[in-house]
Amino acid sequence: MNPARRVYIAILGILVWIAGLIAAYYLIHKPVTPDIALGIGKAAWQIIVTFGAISFTGGLGRRILPLQSAPLLVRVALQAALGMGLICLAILAVGVSIGVNAFYAWLGMVVLAGMSWRQIIAWWLDWVGLTIIWRASNGFGRAVAILLTLLLASTLCTALAPPLKFDALVYHLSLPATYLKAGRIYYVAENAFWGMPQLGEMLYTWVIALAGLEAAAIFAWVAGLLALVGMLGFITSLLDTNSAWVALASLLSGHTLASALGWAYVDWLAILFGFGVLACLVYWRLEDRPLCLLLAGVYSGMALGTKYTAGVMLIAGSGAVFWHARKSPWVRSLAQYCLPAVWISMPWWIKNVLATGNPFYPFFFPAGAMTGLRLGFYDLPAWGGWQEVLFLPLSASIGGVEGAPGYSASIGPLLVSLAPFAWLGWRSRTAAGQVAVIMAGSIAVLGLAAWAVASRFSGLLIQSRLYFSFFPALALLAGAGYQGLNSLKLPAVRLGRVVGALILVVIGFSTLQVGMESIRQGNLRVLVEDYSIQDYLEENLGWYARAISAIQELPGKKKVLMLWEPRSLYCIPDCVADELLDRYIRDAWTSADPESILESWRLAGYTHLLYNRLGAGFVRNQDVRYSEGDWKLLDELLAQLPRGMEFGSAYSLYSLSP
């Protein structure tokens, strides 16, 4: 036998021996159970598919908008954002005319891959900008980067777990799930939030069809990552790397902004498009190119497509354009900015007009399922006094708590504490840096003014998260504020180091808080332990999850009416949620007796009633619009129903059979 062949056979024998023993060992000592392996495999699959979908948005955006002169990471973010805005319109058109399902979703992936595979590769190559900035960062910048990476990892774990947050269960994910159950996009009359712009929901419909429910939250997480890396590259190119890291830390020092990365909300999509507006307006001032102004308008329209109140960027941007172009033909500049915004957001107005006759459904006047009674009931008086307006955003920073009345969000301390110092060290800045700070300041001031005025019209409009689209401007100002403080030369005090240490403490607390929250929720347990999804939901959603499980186990065809329970995601299509918490009152105010109400429910096809006792009790104690007669009528109605299933003291499930 050839000596060389003997060597090869010997090597092969050694490898077979080692591999065989390893296989035999793990056959007995299994490192993971089949269920855990399935869970990890599912998570990996969802990450791969979602990043694939994001790649196609980046490739499409790059095909349309090369942006060769922009910094690498700015290109990455702006191209993906443009691709998202265009793909969502395609999903809307296809979903209304042909349908939505996994086949069409994968067909779209194949078409996009065929159109833009070269651009997709080039788009991914631009991510090398992260390594360039890492190498240019000093110890402080790298410390911030490490903390932010840990925070992002925690929120990714949240995104990989089944969704829990309120708005996702009410409409951000329930609408896509409804469309996919029906196989088409249509007017969902039983959910008033259908009238909101649905850019995010269209994208979520696409990725849910590709890889399941959690893929939507992963997509939202990547949108947030894109916004962050885009701002990192943008601010680095205009100020410096430390200022850029501080800008990101300022955004993520707020618990709501940090945690929302994993929630399947649309807040970070709004921030991504808001960043697009800011970047394009700055480049317009630097390069005096009408194309930049047109693109700023496009991103403003896309921000408006995520939620009505993200249109604050259209207002703030219009004011900034007018101010900066006031000595030139400002009407033309304003038209170049506003017309693309109106055009790109037009499909959302058209959908509402065709379905209900009201382009701004569900607001302003009765249309569709929104009666005059419902409109009046949904509106809330202005929250707080005029001091809330006078001290914005300080009052929102200190007094805002996630889920609490009023601002209902935590935006952290760094945006407000650092931004006022953006003007320090002015002369030492480059001309481009000065232009960026002036533009960001213009947008921030106008955005805050719009927030203050809107908050006096409705108690809902004071919520901080409604205005996140202009927060990239605040973040840039915070980064500039740190740069200005760092430039001060004081005897015996290195102010920059002291401020830097405080920033590390704040972002460290934020990272710790988000990480502990992820651990408490059991996000990793549901991925890597033998911990069922039902156990996870019951641990986090309490009796609600148990009640939904009971509904799913009901025999035969069922249609469940919910009272004071707006979350329907986990029982679509069997449940009709009380999305505005007004179902009972509109029936009580239009019917004379409990028998009439019950008969109307039965005629509508309802077979069961899920009554949220805790929710009703809270409303009874807090909402003065209900009279004692309304509650007496409810007690009489429930007394006529056969004894139902009880879920602690929280929920009761009744049969509506006569």
Image (spheres, grey):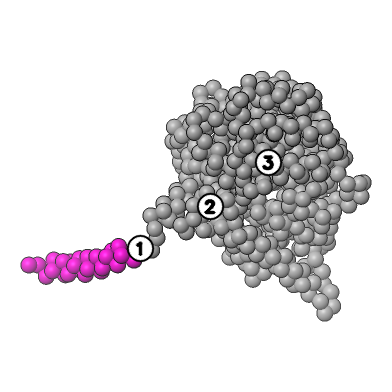
Q: Main secondary structure of the magenta part?
A: helix
Q: Quadrant of residue 415?
A: bottom right
Q: Residue 524: percent from the left, percent from the top?
A: 53, 58
Judged by depth in the image, the label closer to the viewer, 3 or 2, is 3
Q: Is residue 8 left or right of residue 177?
A: left
Residue 588 lies in the magenta stretch: no
Q: Which residue is mark 2?
A: 535
Q: Residues within 10 Å of mark 2 (few under 14, many from 20)?
A: some
Q: Quadrant of residue 252?
A: bottom right
Residue 5 lies in the magenta stretch: yes
Quarter that holds the C terminus = top right
Residue reaching furthest to the right: 386
- Amino acid under disc 1: Lys
Q: Which residue is mark 1?
A: 30
Q: Residues within 10 Å of mark 3 (few under 14, many from 20)?
A: many
Magenta span: 1-29
Judged by depth in the image, the label closer to the viewer, 2 or 1, is 2
